[in-house]
Image (cartoon, grey):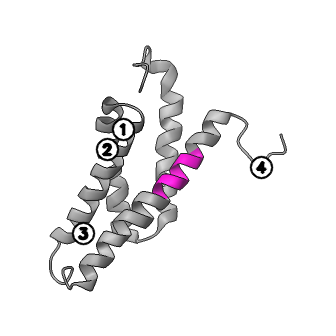
């Protein structure tokens, strides 16, 4: 391998997932909801609109994981999705979210040996 990609294919997949999921969910869905609210003047003095954008995006993120993988995973990723949404809301930048998401994925990968038997679809 030339060093451009991680040596472990699963690690490469988890890094790619972090990048793509953050582009779609934070950079796409959450940003669109925040811009829509702002265009209608809803953000002026109303803290609930950014929170609603974060919650809506996190629920869609969890739903996508539930449909593709399992509902147990959907429940597991919801708190992380809310945290990533909060981070995006505070910074309005994707790179911190991508880095945090990749770190969470790496921790998940490292934790797999200690988690024991996992459900087949988790």
Percent position of residue 99, x then y: 52, 54
- The dominant secondary structure in magenta is helix
**SS state under label 4:** loop
Tell me the mark number nearer the camera, choosing from 2 and 3: 2
User: From the viewer's perspective, is the residue at label 1 or at label 3 nearer?
Assistant: 1
Q: Earlier in the sequence, mark 3 or mark 4?
A: 4
Give coordinates of residue 37: x percent, y percent.
Answer: 24, 77
First in sequence: mark 4 vs mark 2: 4
> What residue is at 28 percent from the left and 36 percent from the top?
75
Residue beneath label 4, please?
4
* Residue located beneath label 3 in the image: 50
Mark 4 vs mark 2: give the one in front: 2
* Among numbered discs 1 and 3, the one appearing first in the sequence: 3
Magenta part of the protein: which range? Answer: 15-22
Secondary-structure class at tag 3: helix
* Residue bearing mark 1: 67
Q: CA separation, marks 2 and 3?
A: 20 Å
Q: Quadrant of the C terminus?
A: top left
Quick check: marks 1 and 4 in contact, CB under 8 Å?
Answer: no
Which quadrant of the view contains residue 87? bottom left
């Amino acid at each position: 391998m030339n060093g451009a990609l991680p040596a472990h294919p699963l690690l490469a997949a988890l890094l790619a997932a972090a990048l793509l999921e953050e582009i779609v969910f934070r950079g796409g869905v959450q940003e669109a909801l925040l811009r829509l609210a702002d265009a209608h003047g809803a953000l002026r003095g109303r803290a609930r609109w950014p929170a609603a954008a974060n919650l809506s995006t996190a629920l869609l993120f969890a739903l996508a994981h539930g449909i593709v993988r399992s509902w147990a995973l959907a429940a597991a990723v919801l708190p992380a999705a809310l945290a990533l949404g909060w981070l995006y809301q505070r910074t309005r930048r994707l790179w911190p979210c991508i880095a945090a998401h990749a770190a969470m994925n790496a921790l998940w990968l490292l934790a797999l040996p200690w988690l024991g038997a996992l459900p087949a679809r988790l």
